[in-house]
Amino acid sequence: MTQKLVIAVCTAQRPKMLQACLESLDRLTEPDAMEMAIVVVENDAEPHFTGTAATALKERLSLPVFFHHEPRKGIPFARNRALEAALEHAPDWIALIDDDERAEPDWIEKLLSACKAHGAEVGNGPVRRIYEQPAPHWWKSQLLKPRPTGSVITEAPTNNVLLSARIVAKDGLGLRFDERLTFGSEDIDFFRRTHAAGAKMIWVDDAFVEEDIPASRVTTGRLLSRMHMAATSGAFNIVLREGRLKAALHFIPKSLRRMTFGLLATVAGFVIKPFFRKRGEKLYYYGLIRLMKGSGNLRGLLGRAHNYYDVIDGH
């Protein structure tokens, strides 16, 4: 029996990256007895992919593509609109990929076959990052360690994931992204709740996508801002799930430790930089990262939004 799979892409003001993403999806190996389609949700005040622009893009692709518009600014709004748009096609499976990524031809095939082989409802794969320019020497990229396909996971991002439509269908679990998490961690939160609801989630080690990292994303300011955003959203997520008191008991001591050691490391790094440049810079920025994480945790406890995603990297 033929099944349906819908690939959902959220985008905002990155037409070149979106085109490359869609072209990679059009080159996917189509699994046996599987009907595929793509839904694109444009998250902007005014849609750009309308009329001739949308028609021209659709004509270049063999897979059917459906454009939708979400005017409310914020990733969880766009993701929920993408889920609703996908459900209009009555799918059995929904895949999520970012607009700055390109899928390997066997991406869907690998995710789907692994989920079926391991009886899983969610499959999450690795992202191979392509840097326009190298990150600073002091930056430690957060790479996931390889692990066997089928390893059970308890959380996942949305940049490379396949999920059973049952998880989001109204007659299934009916889960949605929490629209209060407009400044990050909405995907981690969604899949933590998916796991808590009893859905089996697995890692698929050979289902690759490639992500383009523009030079603007590896400047010192953007890297530190990302650390601050992640700490802010992480703390706010715990506030929403476990209450402010429990979150405060956990994060206030943690924040104070991070900021104390961060300040000491920053001062020490600044002092030794003139004598040992690389070692001093590494210690200096390690301290700044600790300060960003500590202050971000406190900001999250107060429920104050972070504007990291207001800046769009790439085109």
Image (spheres, rainbow, N blue to C red):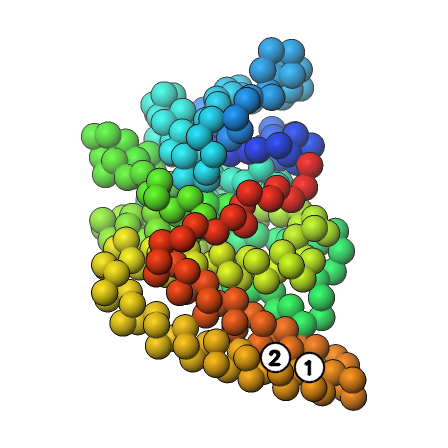
Query: What's the residue at 39%, 58% (across, down)?
Result: 300
Report the front residue among 286 and 124. Answer: 286
**Toward the viewer: 100 or 275?**
275
How far is disc 1 from disc 2 in space, using C-alphas? 6 Å
Q: Residue furthest top?
A: 51
Q: Is residue 118 above or below residue 82?
A: below
Dot 1 alpha-carbon crowd within 10 angstroms: few under 14, some 14 to 19, many 20 or more: some
Q: Give the image location of residue 207, x and y in percent.
A: 53, 48
Q: Are marks 1 and 2 in contact (CB under 8 Å)?
A: yes
Name the residue that disc number 1 marks. 270
Residue 26 at x, y percent in the picture: 60, 28
Left or right: 304 in relation to 132: left
Please determine whether, in this image, residue 137 is positioned above or below residue 30: below
**Residue 153 visible to the viewer:** no
Give the residue drawn at x 57%, y 58%.
225
**Residue 22 percent across, percent down from the top left:** 61, 30
For the point 29% across and 48% down, the residue is: 194
Mark 2 sits on what residue? 266
From the top left corner, tell me how far across and down residue 193 is, in percent.
28, 50
Q: Viewer-proximal residue, 120 or 302?
A: 302
Query: What residue appears at the point 40 percent right and 65 percent down from the top-left corner?
Result: 298
